[in-house]
Amino acid sequence: AARGRKIVCGGTTSHLLADHLDAKLIPDERYIDTDLPPIARLDGVDLVTEGILTLSRASEYLVKGRPKGRMDAATTLLDHLDAVDGITFMVGTARNPAHQNTGLPDSIFLRRTVVEKLARRFETLGKETELKFY
């Protein structure tokens, strides 16, 4: 396994990984009352979150600042990313059938835009970032 922290952002991706690892995905109920989906635990992974909502909120917090005392999936994600020197974003480009015909913008374009924005912001904070699209 690669060195470093492993973070998975995406509900479908986390379920696929849990199946692949033959491991159980366990919701973390500490953040159940926030307006973001809760984080989860998965053996072998440091953090599991929902995808685009959490990434978008993390990006918003980087620009506008984190609300004082706020603990949710986005602040937890930022805590993990703040603690490292470099970040490799591995971004899937497959269309998720669950997101089709929802009236929302194309999820692939949105995902790419949000991750690129996060990477640029972390670069301004002195982090080395790398983007890989699959």
Image (spheres, rainbow, N blue to C red):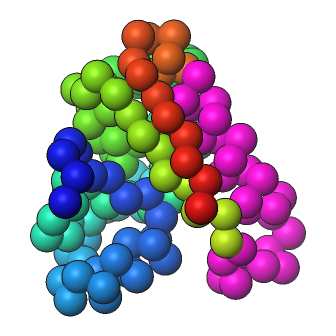
3 relative to 99, above or below: above
Residue, x 54% and y 29% (percent of image)?
119
- Where's residue 6, x and y in %? 27, 52
Quadrant location, the C terminus = bottom right
Tell me the magenta residue range.
Answer: 95-120
Decide if residue 31 is in sight here: no
User: Does the image show residue 58?
Assistant: yes
Q: Is residue 1 left or right of residue 62?
A: left
Residue 78: percent from left, percent from top: 35, 33
Of 37 and 79, the residue lying toward us: 79
Task: Locate residue 50, reporting x and y percent.
Answer: 45, 61
* Magenta segment includes 116: yes
Q: Is residue 77 above or below residue 101?
A: above
Which residue is nearer to you in this view: 58 or 29?
58
Image-quadrant location for residue 47 = bottom left
Residue lying at 49% horizontally and 52% vertically, measured from the top left: 90
Question: Relative to residue 44, is residue 84 depicted above or below?
Answer: above
In the rendered view of the protein, which quadrant contains the N terminus?
Answer: bottom left
Hey, which residue is sitting farthest left in the picture? Answer: 43
Say which quarter of the image contains residue 60: top right
Q: Residue at x 41, y 10 (%)?
A: 126
Q: Is residue 13 left or right of residue 92?
A: left
